Amino acid sequence: MEGNMNITLKVWRQKNKNVKGSLETHEVSGISEDMSFLEMFDVLNERLIDENKEPIAFDHDCREGICGMCSMYINGRPHGPLEGVTTCQLHMRSFKDGDTIVVEPWRAAAFPVVKDLVVDRSSFDRIIASGGFISVNTGNAQDGNSLPIPKEDADKAFAAAACIGCGACVSACKNASAMLFVSAKVSQLALLPQGQPEREDRAKKMVAQMDIEGFGSCTNTGACAAECPKEISLENIARLNREFLSASLTTAEA
Amino acid sequence: MAEGTIKLDAKAPEGPIAEKWTKYRSTVPLVNPANKRNIEIIVVGTGLAGASAAATLAELGYKVKAFCFQDSPRRAHSIAAQGGINAAKNYQNDGDSTYRLFYDTVKGGDYRARESNVHRLAEVSANIIDQCVAQGVPFAREYGGMLSNRSFGGVQVQRTFYAAGQTGQQLLLGAYSGLERQVGMGTVKMYSRHEMLEVVKIDGVARGIIARDLISGKLERHFGHAVLLCTGGYGNVFYLSTNAMGSNVTAAWKAHKQGAFFGNPCFTQIHPTCIPVSGDHQSKLTLMSESLRNDGRIWVPKQKDDKRAANEIPEEERDYYLERRYPAFGNLVPRDIASRAAKERCDAGYGVGTSKMAVYLDYAAAIERYGKAEVNKNNIENASKELISELGKAVVKEKYGNLFDMYKQITGENPYEIPMRIYPAVHYTMGGLWVDYNLMTTVPGLYALGEANFSDHGANRLGASALMQGLADGYFVIPYTIGSYLANEIRTKAIPTDHPAFVEAEKQVKDRISKLVSIKGKQSPESFHKRLGKIMWDKCGMARNEKGLKEAIVEIQALKKEFWSDLRVMGEIEEFNPELDKAGRVADFIELGELMCVDALNRNESCGGHFREEYQTEEGEARRDDENYMYVAAWEFKNESDWVLNKEPLIYENIKIAQRSYK
Amino acid sequence: MSLTGLFLCTFLVVHLIGNLQLFYNDGGYSFNKYAVFMTSFPLIKIISYGNYFFILFHAFWGLYLEFQNRKARPVAYVVTKNSSSFSSRNMAVLGTILLVYIVVHMGDFWYKYHNETLPFVQYTENLLTGEVVTTEMPETYSQETKMVETYNQAESTKTVIVKDLYKVVSVSFQNILLVIFYVLAMFSVSFHLVHGFQSAFQSLGINHPKYNPLFKFLSVWLFAILIPIGYAAMPIYFYFFK
């Protein structure tokens, strides 16, 4: 017992994607406010193992807010109550002693549940594979300074590229749309001179793949950007719309 | 411990250092495109080294299978690297060159790295930047549109390229996009949420792997003409480290047990600027980028056990111990030196914070300096102290905002107002699988790239060099060197995976997993890992001594016994089961921990990150023993707790060896 | 959705300006003439049919999207705290209310105007003074066209006999239930447009820090406040003041 916070945790348990899940309640006592949210889960899991019960499966890896693996829908919000923060960087001091916390997995047809709080986000990889790159083989490159890039463009491209692919945007969107994710990648490459040759093709292919994966469409509610731990801007979605429109209007093939 | 008789051949090309790589590239055997199509390569791990290798080899025409344990190749822990990537571009016109990068790296590594590999690394460093820019990596730029640089520890030029505090992320996403492009084209088959659990050898040559699908729990056999391990470092052996929770040694360890020698396992990098441990619950440590040492000043109170708050301690009662001890490099001394100095102060009773195991990283002076510069720039007369401080904080926020926010998030303290508390933490492992110039291990056809090999950083790695090495190996080295092996493999047909060697390897893996699950003891994998970490940190950590290491070996052996008799793994084998994954990894960490202690005990000298308390100068600096230990210790696995030491002598023909000095 | 939406927004503005003629205190003279113009001038007719098509397209494509979007999340969250606005989340519901409203509204006026026998009214306008005298025609009166204009040069007057849609309006809005329904529907318009107008620009890729405040201003002040109030004022005016 390291601290004196007591939390009532209601956690989604689901054996695998083929069965239905439900919320399970756990009383977690002796929590320190310096613990991260995931460390609170570690404590709970160790206690469950002690009691010969199966621990709760959840995704996590770097625990410093950059790998994008952690993915909990906490009290109705992806990554919990703080803005601009992933679940692994959320600390218990953001909660009060006696709080009830409901934790659910990301929910989307394109993110099937693997187990408990773990979901399968490989749809994101397939979207990138459909066009989220610049086709340059190793060895083709010219000198890094041969194309000056205005600082503003480089900064904007970086801000879009800061996306960690966690899927919070999809989980927050009432339509489970992946537009913010796709637009971040399209924007990054559309803003850089290196991305120009494949610009139109890229927008069309990535949008097509996004639809195939079963994500919903964007209705501009803005929930994605509001919940994005990396604060990716809605301007990117507008840019994607622009790219997609102009690509659809100017290229021959469907 | 026996000493081996095998003569390790690094296979470095003959000739002057600056021409070795060029000559090698022009003479290395090639595989023609038609044959490449029939050759399969397995790449394990998709960090910088793995993703870049898989993408590049597929571009060349090989059939590639890539594996990672994460849910997506983009999440490999390279993503967390903050500060930057070195390259000898000399864009700043400040005297940088390939030779100087080579020299700095060898010196920074305390003269325990192989000259030929390091020089090649320095040569290709510039190509990496070009390649990444072409891929759309948004490096920081100046107003004129040119690439920006900053300085890092142990170096007196500005050669570090960066993308805010997220350079690793941007580089990995670049390599990942190249990899996904090949996946989309069908030239790479990607297996995510797969863990490699065995190397399959046929006639002494690596021919494939056994992997476990972590979702279904089922074992799979995969054939490859060559196997590349790009599986990162083993810092998690210490339990608390800046590594990701899933980072593990399992793939490298399986390779080691199949005959790949392990090079310099005790060489561990302890990073000086991490957020201190706050309690027993702590699951991992968070790094504060080395770039913070560009502007921050490190100090402790001059008075022992000073209970005053940092801001109440007047200037003259502060000990800026790095500036005092190393005036030439000051706060930018290499990591091993900065870490040791912090430990020395804390051990002597000058530490701060509740645990007394921390020092201050103070931005007050930088805030004032930047504030005054802003005041001058804007021609503000009679600026108040508050205004200066406000302007200064804005500058600092722009440069380091994300790091400061992260610190505040974790500690609940505001670093703009009170100095940050930092303490060293395990960060990187210079040791790894022994490889030759071709990056091949002692098992033919089995390669190790990036942090998984031992090759380029000697006993201490300089900041911003890990990203450089990972990408150099994957983009520019392996595509050439693997040709020299595969040119002889063009007649080897794909071996069906019902070959007895695959069957046997799979059975071994299956038995081991069954054993882990069937112990049904009382203690969780996590609890064993924590105990191992404590032994390692206390006795094989920042400072080591003979007595401690001997004790550690005994303790680890006892822990191993306990592990295999009292482990409790919940859940089933054939399902998604993170507890089972963890149990297997901890089992391997325990064995590795013992080897690290054996290696540290063998190396009766101090060098780089390896500090043996018995071997230090009067001023407390590391004292090398070049006469007896100027070699790579390459350990050969014989049996449980039984290794044979093989030595690769290090020969320095291009660098004058000296006592490393940053004074 | 965005293009049809913006078209419909424009329509709302034009329709409101036209309908403001209901407030002229001329016994419906201007309004009835306007109604004739709107239903007989060929170009306007084409635009009207375009408008009906866009309304249907906007409504049914919107409903289809909503249906698809719901499929994208088969299992609902147990707890949700929304970080998006009420209107942005409920466009489909608001839009459906509007569709029902449009059906009722067109049934009330458009259908009656085109297909039912409406009373006629005669206006005699003094072309010199502009004075208008209104005379209701007997119920049995009927004429071939919607409007017959005759000039009397001697008296400098113009006589116009026209279908009295104005009367239909003023009678309909004596029904308190209809008035309430209309006013409520205008709340739907308000919420639908406060999101819809801005959202259309975002969908077309127009998002710029310099112009976003303008779109926001228009969507709030023009489309969410001014226009719904303008429309709602009509039934209220007729109910209370006529």
Image (spheres, coloured by chain):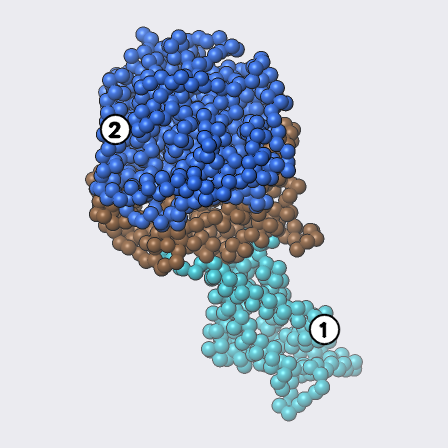
Q: CA distance from mark 1 to mark 2?
A: 97 Å
Q: Position of residue B640 (x, y in %)?
A: 30, 29
Which residue is most to the bottom? Answer: C140
Q: Quadrant of residue B390?
A: top left
Answer few, some or many: residues within 10 Å of disc 1's Cα (few below 14, many 20 plus, some between 14 and 19).
Answer: few
Q: Which quarter of the image is occupied by the C terminus of chain B? A: top left
Q: Colour of chain B?
A: blue
Residue drawn at x 27%, y 33% is B530
In the structure shown, which secondary structural element does the residue marked by tag 1 occupy? loop
Label drawn at residue C41: 1
Q: Amino acid at mark 2?
A: Gln
Q: Is residue B605 above or below residue A44?
A: above
Q: Are marks 1 and 2 on the same chain?
A: no
Residue drawn at x 26%, y 24% is B553
Q: Colour of chain A?
A: brown
Q: Position of residue C122 (x, y in %)?
A: 67, 83
Report the front residue among B59 and A128: B59
Label drawn at residue B288: none
Which residue is most to the right? Answer: C153
Q: Is residue C101 above or below residue A90?
A: below
Q: Position of residue A55 (x, y in %)?
A: 29, 47
Residue drawn at x 57%, y 15% is B14
Query: Would residue B385 be visible to someone looking at this image?
Result: no
Report the front residue among C53 and A114: A114
Camera-nearest label, 1 or 2:
2
Q: Which chain is cyan?
A: C
Q: Amino acid at mark 1?
A: Phe
Q: Which residue is mark 2?
A: B557
Q: Position of residue B77 (x, y in %)?
A: 43, 35
Q: Is residue A116 found left or right of B135 in the rendered image?
A: left
Task: Report in which chain the residue with disc 1 lies.
Answer: C
